[in-house]
Image (tube, coloured by chain):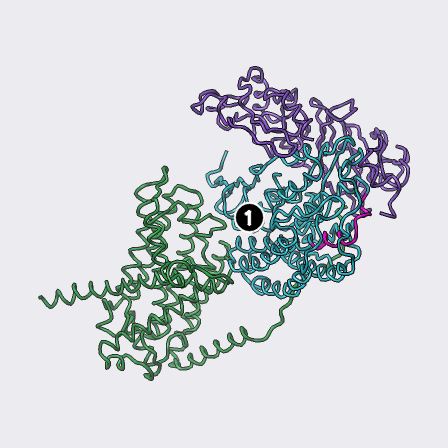
Amino acid sequence: MSELTPPGSPPPATTPPAAPAAPAAPPARSVDELKRDPLVAAAVSRIDDAILGAKELVGEITLFIDRDRIVEVCRAFKDDGFVYLVDLAGVDYSKYPGHTGLRFSVAYTLYSFQKNARVRLRVWTDENGPVPSVTPVWKTANWHERETFDMLGITFSGHPNLERILMWEGFNGYPLRKDFPIRGIDTGARIYPEVFPEGGGPKPGSTGKPAADVNLYKGEWKRYGTWPAAQIGGGAKPAAPKPAPKPVAAATGAVAAPATVAPAPEAGAAPQADDDEEVN
Amino acid sequence: MFDVHEMEVNFGPQHPSTHGVLRVLLKIDGERIIDAKPIIGYLHRGTEKLFEHMAYPQCIPHTDRMDYVASATNNLGFVETVEKLMGISKSIPRRAQLMRVMLSELQRISSHLLWLATHAIDIGAMTPFFYTFREREQILDLFEEYCGARLTLNCMRIGGMPDDLPHGWLDDLEEFCGKFDAAIDEYESLLTTNRIWKRRTVGIGVLSPEEAIEWGITGPPLRGSGVEWDLRRAQPYECYPDLEFDVPTGINGDTYDRYLVRMVEMRQSNRILKQCIPLVKQTPAGDIKAKISKVIRPPEGEVYHSIESPKGEIGYYIVSDGKTQNAYRCHVRPPSFVNLQALPAMAKGHLVSDLVALIGTIDIVLGEVDR
Amino acid sequence: MNKALLTYLVWPVVKFLIAFVIVQLIVVAMTWIERRLLGFMQARLGPNRVGPWGLFQGIADPVKLLLKEDILPSSAEKIAYFLGPMLPLVPAFIVFTLIPYGPPPEFTVTRVNVGLLLILALTSTAVYGIILGGWASNNKYSLMGGLRSAAQMVSYEVPFGLSIVGVLMICGSLDLVTIVRYQEMNAWNFLPQIVACFIFFVSMNAENNRTPFDLPEAESELVAGFHTEYSGMKFAFFMLAEYSMMIVNSCLIVTLFFGGWTLAMFDLGITTSFLKGLGIFGGIIGAVILFAKVMVFMLVYVWFRATFPRFRFDQLMDLGWKWLIPLSLANIFVTGIFILAGQERLMYWIGLGTIGLTAFYLFKPRRVEPAAPAPQKVIHAS
């Protein structure tokens, strides 16, 4: 406790610091200073104009990269010793407080064995704009990008095999998007097309019961602690009026780039929203 | 179109040696693998989505369920990431650090034991399975003694440990450590110099160091390829700088080298445990928590942190918006997921029997692959 | 009653039934012994719930299998699927009539002067059932198991047969009784034919699909190989055939190389004439000796199972074609030279020497090394 810097541990809990927020000892460096950091300077010098910004937190340098030039930048970093792509993660910033601009961010974490340090590259994108795939640079990016596509619907152009990896093909929605309800959506399309109409939701009568009764617990849900009463989806709005065009896009090919955001709300966007609030 | 000689076989998802619900779509010519395509996702539980909807401490039990045979290291990775984000990494009491190290190393041994058991039984040697479970049981007993759980430990907290060590735990640990080296000798006497074992593993699934890095492989498979890289050594966390251990590496990058690397790693983990015991005894009892507020609300920002799990580098990428008690986004970098990706490259040209050995040598846990 | 009828029909049938019952009892006992012994070797208990020390496990298992649902896969080839488990069982049972369990004529069911050939011919038909079952199941794993089994049996049938030739050359007969009588008068055949004995033992393991040659049913690769789709009593038939064949083969190796029902060499010890002198009890003693020797080999099977990993398919073929067949041919050649030179006794010393050297190699003190790979410098991809 003693050697800790004053703005360290106790305050953030009670009063979260403002935007800069970095408890790192040195004051936040400017973008130019970060670019000149010995860790990234050599690589940056080659692709300086592709770097849109930079920031640093707890000693981790993040560079914001022009989306269309990410492959070039990655290659430059790889040539500079960042041979190991540690991680590739997409983030949906649509509900991030105060966020404006493009919806998604893709973060590439690179590691250099010689320098024994990581650097993070980030690009901004949205549902429509494909991010150039870095699979030509690192083979390992293949599954990472597939996972990002699967979970968030970010498309990667030039990927050899961009299809769902964790969810099944034809799954109707992107689970890690912020508008996807945490309780999930009813969609069985593609697996049992004869039972489930494409677009999801059990067809009335397919199980011998009305759709509203399927999986619907009639009793009282017990409340534990401060959690909200659990609800089972599926009973509320079985009708699937509008998603008809969407699953076609999802079904015809994995690269359902344009506007596949919408299918989720059909399962009930409104209750999901207050779920989000209460759960926390 | 298929050649008449080719056959398509679904290897899994229900198969004795896919270690869970991995499905490999094999295209084989006789018994030779022409193409292998791993299909995953059968165990997908949306862990990352759940993380976004839970306060940070509530996430810890969910990390258990990812790599369910190495939950302590999963916990450790998560709590360290949050601590890094909060800037309290340095203020964890030494006793808590040592306890974390001990639990992780025990977990490493237990995970490697399970790997050895399944790997050996996949290749047809039945007996090591039972020998390793004998020791693994003792480790699980130690876990149970500490936190009450045997598999899903939930044994770490942000800022420290939940409880102090129970009375006599260190003595039990010491007894285990004293016996364990002889136990490894016993496993090795069954396998290491066994001619059949060598014929089944030497030269199978060779990965060059360059290839291994290209595929992002970490952990024992990377070291088996000859890259001396261990996060405990490269970017030491907790009190690993104070502890002596060697990082074993292989030469040929084949299944046999990966086997040897893991066997040596178990010995090294045991060595670390032996060093920890006197160090823990020097620290004041009960000093296991840093002084942090009850409500954990890290500052705004994003952070990536990773530790060396038994399978490789397990990393967490957390984006915090600074306003809520839960992560805005928590992405897991699971070692099994990344390592499994190299399976087709390793399996091509080998026989079906070798695929079994390869799945074993990558040491995947499907809970982690699918999350 | 007609004497011929008695000699050629009634007695053989009675004797066969007795032998059959005894062998089936051994099969039942074996399931228990194997699992208990495996348990002992693997630091666990093994079956210990049914009866004292789990003794009735061998009965409980068949009863359970009998009561289980007999599943017929909808896409299976029905007739072949039914034939699959029966085909290996029939030759296994017929072969029991050909093995001399004690001094003739009371303790041989039938004495055929080409008994050895007949046994070889019959045992090699067992593979048809396995292939048929594997194919008829209409399951890719079963098919692969069946094909593996076919390749394995065909390739190991050759060294299996060739290794016997040396014995025939020494004893000069295909009649098992004559071979045993020869052994008690001279030395047991494993001394002059130590190489053949080794080859016979290895190929007999492979013939029976036992570890380390259990590829056709490698549970970690092919789920359960040719019997993946079989359940209930059909599965039990496969198991019964496998264990029966184990006993048959153990009987064969004992008869061919280890003196059969006698405990005598150079006409010293418990010889056939000594047993005959004791009348029917002597015969029983002979049978007990035979089955005691058989049990030793059965336990070795179990020991192998606990110790070895499994061969890969191509390595199995390697071993068979590149090592065992040339070795057995060389053995025939060398044996022929010794016989021509009239130096058969010299072969005993060679056998003794081989055994001594092997024992020395096996039991010499050796260092257990951790076998850590040499540390290597960090390699970077760039």
Q: Residue at x 59, y 55 (%)?
A: B116
As rendered, which of B251 and B266 lies closer to the eye? B266
Magenta part of the chain: B88-102
Residue B20 is a magenta residue: no
Q: Is residue B211 left or right of residue C298?
A: right
- Three-letter amino acid code at disc 1? Leu
Task: Give x and y (percent) for residue B215.
Answer: 68, 43
Task: Give x and y (percent) for residue B321.
Answer: 77, 31
Task: Give x and y (percent) for residue C350.
Answer: 46, 78
User: Splitting the image into 4 quarters, where does residue C30 fall?
Assistant: bottom left
Give the farthest residue toward the left.
C1
Q: Is residue B3 visible?
A: yes
Q: Secondary structure at mark 1?
A: helix
User: Splitting the image into 4 quarters, where does residue B167 fall?
Assistant: bottom right
Residue B98 is a magenta residue: yes
User: Splitting the image into 4 quarters, where does residue C88 fall?
Assistant: bottom left
**Chain letter for the green colouring in the rendering:** C
Give the farthest residue toward the top.
A241
Alpha-carbon neighbours of circle 1 within 10 Å: few (<14), some, or many (≥20)? many
Colour applied to chain B: cyan
**Chain letter for the purple colouring in the rendering:** A
* Residue A280, above or below C110: above
Q: Is residue A139 visible?
A: no
Residue at the disc numbered 1: B355
